[in-house]
Each structure stands twice: as structure tokens, then as C-alpha cells.
Image (cartoon, coloured by chain):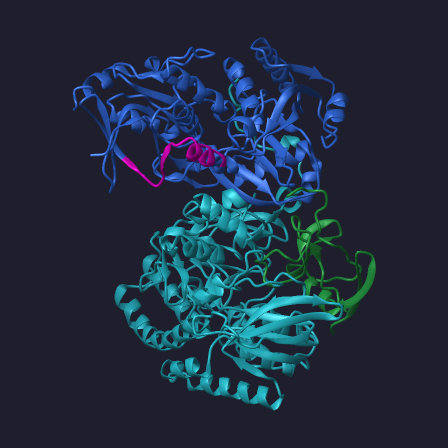
Chain colours: A blue, B cyan, C green
Amino acid sequence: MTEAFDVAVVGAGVMGATTALHLARAGMRTALIDRGAICREASGVNAGTLTLHMTRAVLIPYAIRGRQLWLDAPDWLGMDAGARATPGLSVAFTPAERDMLEHRAAARRAEGAPIELVTPAQARAIEPGLNGDIIAAAHCALDGHVTAYLTGRAYRRALVAAGATLMEQHPVAGIDRAGGQFAIRVAGQPAVRARRLVLAGGVWLEAMLGWLGLHVPVKCLINQLVVTERMRPVMRSVLGIANGLLSLKQFENGTVLIGGGWQGIGDPARGGVEAIPDNLIGNVRLARAAIPALAEGRVARIWLGLESETADALPMIGPLPGIGDAYVIGCVHSGYTSGPFMGKLLADHILDREPELPLFDPARLVQPQRAATLEKTP
Amino acid sequence: MNGRATDLVVVGAGPAGAAAAMQAAALGVRTVLLEDEAAAGGQVYRAPATTRDMARSPERRQGDALRAALAGSSVQVEHGQKVWSVSGQYRVDVLGPQGPGHWQAPALIVATGALERVVPFPGWTLPGVVGLAAATILLKAHGMAPGERTLVAGAGPLLAAVAVGIVKAGGKVAAVVDLATPGEWAACLPAMAGRPDLLARGAGWLARLRLAGVPILTGHALAAVAATPDGLRATVQPVDSLGRPIPGGAATSFEVDAVAVGHGLIPSTDVTRLLRVEHWFDPASVTWRPALDAGFRTTRAGVYVAGDGGGVLGVAAAGLQGRLAGLAVALDLGRLSQVQHDARAEKLRRKLARAARFGAAMARMMAPRPGQFAAIPADAIVCRCEDVTRAEIEEAAAEGACEVNQLKAWTRCGMGPCQGRVCGDTAAALLAQFHASDRETTGLFTGRTPLRPLPLDQLTGEYGYADITLPPPAPL
Amino acid sequence: MPQRVDFSFDGVPLTGWAGDNLAAALMQAGTRRLRDSPRAGQARGAFCLMGSCQECIVWVDGARREACRTTLHAGMAIRSGTIADVAV
């Protein structure tokens, strides 16, 4: 039998990959296991928005640090994943949206986001591509974007350099606990043995926690994302609408990414199944309302990204209750932005270093009645 | 947005789609046939774009007959409809002259035909270099050759068809450059014997080319095309049976102003990949094909594929497959009993077997040879949309990209507006060669909406902010 | 009867058959370079002529269209489909 790993991380998205990277760099023998390729689910297909305008208010301190890590990626990750700082704007077209904008900006400002209300004229000075019909706007200096599809390539290089063992195309079938170790059963492969376990499976965390007898409901959102073909520069900010239903940015290559959480069809079992055409048209109309020059472009591709959410819409990051040496990380709203920071927080906790900000105790989310029955299973 | 219900939607009005639609409609199935072009016929029976005089051909006559039959049928033919999404069970979204709209039907026949494969070589991106299939379109629809002096290169029966078409249209053919040798063609004869008409036509083409003094270089490949002050210089070289350049083989150059090149046809699987039906890799034709039963049903209930989109077997097979798929739809929708269905299907299946034998032989002649992919120079562009070279693909492969969708994310290969239709096959073949893996491992680009790029102005139309139906706001 | 009509490409006056698609009409008029590729800046022209490859994208009276999927009418002002000012 091969020697047990110090830690096995199941789920090679940005949460799991960051945790694994820091643990490997700290000298732990680390296995990172995924049923597919690294960062090919939410971490590779999200909109890459670095914005505080859409971040849950209480997560703002985390998002600010995560954003900085993305911008500094060449230094600590070793590759530029295309992170760029840009101004961020949230705009309102109607009085109701203006009220929402003012209320939300105030709440986020209270949590440390440098969001200020600006006049429509000031907003247009920041973003000349903006529609003149907006009636209010809020500006955040700490916004930007990342080229999400490069995430896997960047993390893979770093993990290989750090000596982590990357097990892609390794679908985990279950986890047993024996002799103070975790035995991670992989279809068609010998079990991977490890002294510590980190579950980082995004929308699949409900199923993964079930392997350990813990019942934690995880809701799955199916976000539709839209990208145009390359077009001339038509905008330079990260742009949203007060209601959070639009996120818009133009990358250096000229493509414009249109998001905002419009839903498609899918579920954790099947992944993203299909885009909803009417939701595409609504989302793109909203985008064109914000940046009229988008009318010149063409929609090149639509895809779906799965986003996870707990019952209280806050993350679970920390030790699993009643199971020693097992941890979970995930369900972070705007998780891509804060991911590099969240993974570092959990790695610090596992390494007995003082985390810079508090974790998010998963115990609060465990449904007790089902957990009690399942804990008896071997 | 207007949405209309019917019994059957057929996508693509080529020989397969038109036959399928007419067969189903004749049995009482309400049928809508969607076509992007202004006239039915597909590429083989392509209609002339204008009324000006063009050379007559058997395809033109057969195409006119098909269009007349369609006009006289109860099929509702909708032209100028770009199908961009298929969802639900089944909603087909189109972008037409009146903007976006959709159709709803329990049955869907995908008859989107084939795409042309061109294995990259230096200069294949130059203006003036077109596909063989593109050349047939210029000849049939516009009565013109791709240039004044054209080099015709690649593999398969389109070579002679295009070369003769150019000669008839008054153009010059610098040479026909065929990967295959006369021996390889001769080996096909048994399979072709079932179609003496086509065999005779092929012989006639060769005679016509000889008469016109067109050099025919067999066992040769187009190695490179370069731009010159006056046009293009095409360099060809002898290759072995695996498509590898023969060491020391004498290269020949031709001064031309156009090159028509193609290395066979690939089933157009955009719709079936989007619908996630099962596909299988066919090593004989080196193509991915949707898995189909005898009624051309896919692995998804209510979705059928007829014609080259299910596997390239040519126009005769396509029409027969269309009729069989139409019968299967009528059976599945309860318009025919099993006995009635079988009585009609049996004769068609016998004819299809004959047509398919010929088609499969042609598909094998068009199949790419491994040496063609190996011969792509490192700095040659593979993905034309994003200018991704072979070297960049292999750099990503060396870093751990094993599968085409991962490659796409790491390099943008296949991420441009053609959505990977042009580069996907080559990228997968290169990955498989690099890792010594197989095409099942390197996979297929995931099907994505929209099936073709959508101009935002047409998609969004004229609207006011209040016209946008907004979902509930995101939580704070 | 088919008609010859005037149109233009990047301001250069051309003539073609009304009803032809733009890709064929431009080719017949001797205009082959329809755009430059966005990353390498290489000249590109019509390639597949069946709406698949997207190489023949041009601006037609200000709208971005596939030349091989657009019918020529009198007076059309066509511009090169090159996208300027984008990075690799």
C-alpha cells in the first residue's frame, strides 16, 4: 500500500486548489482529486467579475482581500490569469432601482466597500460607453475582472511546482474512515488514503458531506453566461445594475461577457443542461440598455455555471463537526472573487496558523436528525 | 415572442430534410421545415442565387424537381431562418427576417448535413484559398469559379467534380492534386459497382479534365500556399499512403490566383451535441457521429437525424434516410401502424443499403490520413478565428491539457465565432497524437447555444427598458 | 432579369449581380481580402461560403453580417470586418 497523504482535497475548483496549494507549499503531502479536469466547473466558467457591488455585504472584507490576490497572481500563483483592476459601476434606470442602489451602496459601505454615489454625468465620465438614460449610479474603485477560463492552467502549473499530486479524471465514489485515516474510493482506482480530508466540491458538497453522514442542504443556481465575439472597445468598467441582474465587462481581447445570474436549466446530477432562450434575450437586452454600442456585436456563446448556496446563503468553511481532521470549504457567494483568500484561510486553520479573518462554521448548517442516523453507518 | 406549435420540426432543407419533411407531411404529420438559405436543396442541390444563365447539370435538375415537390407538398417551408437554439422537448429558436421566434414540436429531425474538413497547411488562411465545398457553391449558385486559375487539391470525389465545374464555367484548373493513388481508387470499384451511373460520371469527369489538359497529380498533397505579388503560389509534394511527405520527393509549384482544397466531409453535429445525445467515433471515416437506430432515432426520444449529419454517406443515401426518418416520426406519433411502417420502410432500407455502400466507400476515400496531421508545421494556424497555432496547442498539451474543452479554455482554440467547427477536428487529432491517446479521450467540443453567432441588434430588436422582463433582484 | 447593381467595399465602388450573396459578389469584383484576423492581423477572405467558418464577416450598412449569408442589393456600403484595437 502506498503511503498515506497528509491531506486529500476533493474538488479541484478554486477553493480546493488554493487550499491544496497552500498546504503543499507548507510541506504537506497533498493530493488534489477531481472527477474532471482542474477548474473546469464554476471556477473556470464563471464571469470573472471582481466587484463589491454584487458581493454579499458581510463577505466584503473577504472579497477585498481575494480581489487583491487575483491582481497579485503573478507573484503568488506564478501566472497572470488576466486579472485587471477597473472601475466598477452599478447603475439605475428607474426610481425603484435608484432606491435599491442607494440602500445597497450604504449597506456595503458599512462593511468596508469604498462605494460612493455619483451623478449620471460622473458615471459617464468613468464609463463613456454608458447609456445616457441612467438616473443614478454608484462607483467602486476596487473592482475588476479575471479571465476565468485561464484559472485551471494557472493553478495546475502552481500545484505541479509545489509538488502536489494532481488526480484529474478521478471520480470519487465514497469515503471510508479506518485506522485514523480517510480512504477515498475512486472508481477503477485504488483508494487514496490521507490523514486529513478537505471537501471542496461546490454544488456537489451536499452529496460529498453525505459520504461522511452529514446532511447539509446545498441549493444549486444555474447561471447563464453570454459572451460576444471580439469587438472594438465599447466599455472599460465592470458594470452592473442595482438589482444585480447584470454584470458586464470587456476583456482586453475585445470580447464582452454578459452575466447577472439569469437562470438556465440544470442540476448537480446532470450539470448545466440547457440555456433558456428567453433568459438570454432578457439578459442581452439589459446589457444593450446599459452599453448601447453592444448592438454592433454578436453573441458567440452561451454556457452555464453552477453556483452553490447554503440555507443562510453564507459560506461553510472550517472543520466538520464530530469528524476529526475533516474540513469543508465552499458555497461562497461571489466565491470566485474571494476564493484565493478563502482557500488560504482554511489552509491557515489546518496548519494551526491564526486565520486573518473568521471562518464560517459548517456546524450551523448540519441538519441534526439526519446526521444522527447517518453517523451510525460505518 | 411568437412561438408556434406543430407536430414536427425539420432543421435543414437539403435532400435529407426535404425528403423527411415531405414523407412525414404526406402521412398527416404537421411539419415545419426550417432553412437558413433562400431556397431548399442543401449544398448538392444548391439553387442558383439569381436567374442569370448557368450551366445545367443533373444536380440542378434534381434540385429543381425537389423544390417543385416541396412547393406542392403540405410542408410549411420557412426560409431565411437561422436556427440558434434547441431546448426543452422541443423548442426550436430561430432568427429570421422578422427577428427572433420559435417553434414547438414533440418531434425534431436534424438534417443539417456536413461540414468540410480542411487539414491545416501554411497559407490555408490566405484570401483566395477556399474549401472544395465552397467552390461547388460558387459554381452552382453563382456560376463562377473561385479564380481565373485555380489549383484543386485534397481528397475524395469533390476534386474531380470541382475541377470539371471550373472548366465548364470557363475557368482554368492549374492541376488536380489528389492524396489518393489510382490504386486506392481502383480498390473502391467493387463498392462503386452498385452505382454505375456515378461511376460513368466520374469517368466522364476524368476524360473531360484530360481533354482540357489539366494535370492530375495523384499521391500528392498541397504542402503550402504563399502570397505573391500577382496571386498565390501553391506548392505540392508527393506523399505516401499515410499522407506523409516522401523524403526527397520533388516539390512542384503552381502560380495561381485561387486554391480549392478539402479533405473530406464531417457530420455537422452542432445540434446533436447541444442536445447531448450519444455520439460515437467512427474510425473508418475519422468522424464523430450521433448514435442512431434503424429509424434514425437518436438516444433522445423525439430527436432524429437524417442525412450526412448522422454520418457522411452522400446525397442518395440522405434522401432515403430522410424518408425513413419521416416514416419513423409518423410511427412514433401514431400516424402509422407498425405493420404499415414496416411495409414502407423495407423497400427503402434495401435501396439505402446500396446507396450507403457507395457513400461509405467515398467517405473512406475522403478520410484524413494520420500523416496529414503530423505534417502540420508548428507555426501553422489551426484555429483560424483565434489564430492559435499547432505549437500553442502542443504547449497546452504538454502542460496537461488532454481533452479539447480544456484545451479550448487554456488557448482559446475553438473559442471564436466559428465555435470550433473549423478547428475542432484537427485540435482533437493533434491532442490524440501528442498524448498517444485516442479520439474518445480527446473528446468533442461541448455543444453550445447559439448554434451560429447572433447579431445583437437582430436578437434584441427594438425595445424599451420597460419591455425587459426582469427576474427578482439578487439578494443583498 | 438579373441586374447589375452598384455597391462599395471600404469606399471603393464595385458592381455585381443583385441577388448574389456578398461573398460571391465581392470575389467576382476582385475583392478577396474581407478582413484581418484579430490576433495575428492576417488577411482573411471567404472560405466556406456556407455560414460556418465566419471568415467573411463584414460590416453591411453598419451591421455585422456574414457576407456569404447576405444578399447583394443596390447601394450597399460594405466595410472590412476587421476589429481594431484589441489585444491578443
User: Residue at (42%, 70%) from the top-left corner?
Assistant: B313
Residue A283 in sight here? yes
Question: Residue A5 appears in which quarter of the rendering?
Answer: top left
From this viewpoint, which residue is outermost toward the front?
B248
Question: Residue A324 appears in which quarter of the rendering?
Answer: top left
Q: Is residue B54 left or right of residue A361?
A: right
B252 is within the stretch colored magenta = no
Q: Is residue A316 left or right of residue B228?
A: left
**Residue B15 on image: x %, y %:** 48, 69
Q: Is residue B282 left or right of residue B127?
A: left
Can you say which quadrant of the picture contains the N terminus of chain B? top right
User: Residue at (66%, 52%) from the top-left corner?
Assistant: C37
Q: Tell me: residue A283, above or below residue B223.
A: above
**Residue B454 on image: x %, y %:** 60, 48
Q: Nearer the viewer, residue A216 or A33?
A: A33
| Range covered by the magenta-colored residues | A154-172
User: Residue at (38%, 85%) from the top-left corner?
Assistant: B193
